[in-house]
């Protein structure tokens, strides 16, 4: 069973990430992504306390559903179950020698590009809300983008100071260049587009499955490119 299988609140999600951090070797590629995800979750959770949302319960549930997809992928490391396609590049190279930023970006690609649209659609279905562009759901989603913008500037520092990895040859230049190619807000904007399309296809059966298959394949390719 995934260590995060019972997480039903944001504190529970954070506790599950902390447990993964303890369980995995420090230089493991999944552990590096996990520490980044943990730091971002803590920072956004703190910042969100002073933010006015139109539907906070929806956002909190979205965070839990979203994290659960990562926990399911992480659990395949020990369970022997088939790893979700989008996560295979990170999981399969996690013990190899890479820059920490490569592991982090591969994990973010898998989680945001692939998992986030699915989490949005799943949560919308639970709440009976459509992910329309002019909706409270989307406005709150964009408010989170604003919170993430305050975190994004700290990420390079987390690598450079060794907070996320204990590897001696982390190069600030490589870190800066890699981060310059990635934007959390831009990735989330694309993910929202996928979510709205998936919502429209939710009853389309084969078409929905085909769309999800293409999304998984393209995300796998993106994550693989980040690990070269």
Image (tube, rainbow, N blue to C red):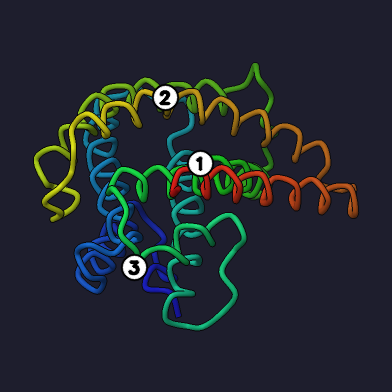
User: Quick one: which residue is furthest to the top in this view?
Assistant: 134
Task: Give 18 or 155, whichever is nearer the viewer.
Answer: 155
SS label for mark 1: helix
Q: Give the number of the disc on residue 95.
A: 3
| Label at residue 101 | none
Instruction: Name the foreground residue: 177 vs 199.
Output: 177
Mark earlier in primary sequence (1, 3): 3
Quarter of the rendering containing residue 131: top right
Q: Quadrant of the N terminus?
A: bottom left
- The 10 Å Cα crowd at callout 1, few under 14, some 14 to 19, many 20 or more, is many
* Location of mark 1 (residue): 112
Residue at position x 61%, y 41% from top?
Answer: 117
How many numbered marks are there? 3
Instruction: State how far apart marks 2 and 3 are (Cα).
Output: 32 Å
The image quadrant of residue 218 is top right
**Residue placed at 60% from the left, 28% from the top?**
190
At label 2, counting other C-alpha atoms closer than 10 Å, the crowd grade (few under 14, some 14-19, many 20 or more) is: some
Most foreground residue, 169 or 43: 169
Instruction: Give the mark nearer the N terminus: 2 vs 1.
Output: 1
Q: Which residue is mark 2?
A: 145
The crowding category of the residue bearing disc 3, from other C-alpha atoms within 10 Å (few below 14, some 14 to 19, many at least 20), is few
- Mark 2 vs 3: CB contact within 8 A: no
């Amino acid at each position: 069973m995934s260590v995060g299988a019972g997480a039903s609140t944001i504190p529970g999600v954070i506790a599950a990430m902390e447990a993964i951090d303890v369980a995995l070797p420090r230089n493991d590629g999944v552990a590096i992504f996990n520490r980044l995800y943990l730091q971002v979750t803590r920072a956004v959770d703190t910042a969100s306390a002073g933010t006015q949302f139109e539907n906070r319960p929806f956002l909190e549930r979205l965070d839990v559903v979203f994290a659960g997809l990562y926990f399911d992928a992480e659990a395949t490391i020990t369970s022997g179950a088939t790893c979700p396609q989008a996560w295979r590049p990170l999981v399969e190279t996690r013990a190899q020698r890479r820059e920490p930023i490569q592991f982090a970006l591969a994990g973010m690609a898998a989680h945001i590009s692939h998992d986030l649209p699915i989490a949005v659609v799943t949560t919308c279905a639970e709440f009976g809300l459509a992910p329309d562009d002019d909706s409270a759901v989307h406005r709150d989603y964009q408010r989170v983008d604003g919170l993430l913008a305050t975190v994004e500037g700290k990420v390079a520092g987390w690598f450079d100071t060794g907070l996320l990895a204990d590897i001696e040859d982390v190069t600030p230049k490589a870190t800066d260049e890699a981060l310059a190619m990635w934007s959390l807000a831009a990735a989330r904007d694309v993910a929202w587009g996928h979510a709205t399309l998936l919502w429209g296809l939710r009853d389309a059966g084969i078409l929905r499955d085909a769309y999800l298959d293409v999304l998984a394949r393209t995300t796998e390719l993106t994550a693989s490119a980040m690990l070269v």
